[in-house]
Image: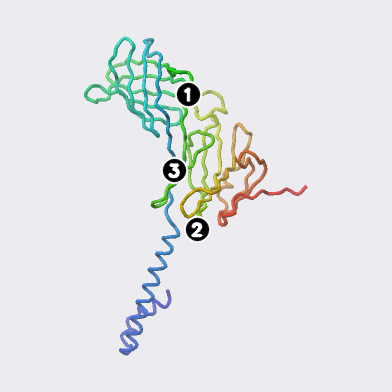
Amino acid sequence: MHSLIFLLDFHKFSELKPFDMQASLFQIILTTVYLLFSFSILNTYAQDTQLSVSQNCPILQLSGEIDDEQASMILNIHEQEVIGHYSFDNNSKKLKVYGKLESNAIYLSQMDENLNVIAIFKGYFEGEELFGKWKYLYSQKQDFLSMKPLQPSAKRTCRFTFNISRENSNVIVGLPDNKAPFEYSILAEKQLENKSYILINYSFYSQGTCYSEGYCACGVESKLMWLELNHDFDIVNKKELLYESCLGDISNKSNKLKKQTIKLYGWLNQHAKGEFSIDLKHLEKGFTEIIQNK
């Protein structure tokens, strides 16, 4: 950088002889090419990695009561989008609905023939059953809903996954607890030779929902997920550390995550229980068990 500033000193530049000026111009060109190449290398190394959550559920066929009248409902759920319809048993008219699913909570809007929203539904799943309330926009009427699957064996099995993408590469990671994370982020990442290492921090409710009563239903489970990916962006190694849990009676101070070397007590891959550390500058080493001197 100092040489570049010197070369741009126009007063000295004007005093140079023709041969020296050619040499200096050549040096400027070389320096510029070098800097551009260096920036290119840096940008290649520090690629932007994106993290998102997807939710996939099957088509639900439900039957039950809406305001004490027998009714049936069909919902097609893909990720967080919900499209479907319902009808009363004594009326074949299908009432269209659309909305979104967030963990166990579901929000729907009912449309008329002109696709205008005329009612809003807010409900939640408790096990396999759906409960909630319709509120109509142009009247004070409210209808309560209670429905069950038409087939008891057709459970509402939703799968939650992390989608990790970088440029044209993408990898999907299943969440073994199968509960929707309400908070998640990439805590650290590193590229070394032909491999990538990513550390994800995420939290979810202990029972998957906060609608049920009781502290541990709304308790928080927090994990660190360590991933090793090859040059094709495929997962070759994965480890998870449960470091905060209402159900497992595990507690750590959250400010420990802000240090370069994180030391946490918890369960590693739900098998080994103890104290572990991970160095964010040497992410390739993964979790290391801290052996206590007896």
Do the residues bearing badges 3 and 1 touch, measured as CB atoms within 8 Å? no
Q: Is residue 129 above or below residue 199?
A: above
- Most distant residue in the left direction: 114
Q: Residue at x 43, y 34 (%)?
A: 55
Q: Quadrant of residue 14?
A: bottom left
Q: Residue 163, which numbered label?
A: 3
x then y, percent, for residue 180: 48, 34
x then y, percent, for residue 136: 31, 19
How far, Cα to Cα, is label 2 from label 3?
A: 21 Å
Q: Which residue has dot 2 on it?
A: 194
Relative placement, left or right, of 35 versus 223 is: left
Q: Nearer the viewer, residue 80 or 159?
A: 159
Frontmost of labels 3 and 1 is: 1
Relative placement, left or right, of 139 versus 154 is: left
How dense is the environment of label 1, judged by Cα within 10 Å: few (below 14), some, or many (20 and up)?
some
Q: Is residue 143 above or below residue 257?
A: above
Q: Amino acid at mark 3?
A: Asn
Q: Earlier in the sequence, mark 1 or mark 2?
A: 1
Q: Earlier in the sequence, mark 2 or mark 3?
A: 3
Q: Which residue has dot 1 on it?
A: 155
Q: Amino acid at mark 2?
A: Asn
x then y, percent, for residue 283: 56, 54
Q: Quadrant of the N terminus?
A: bottom left
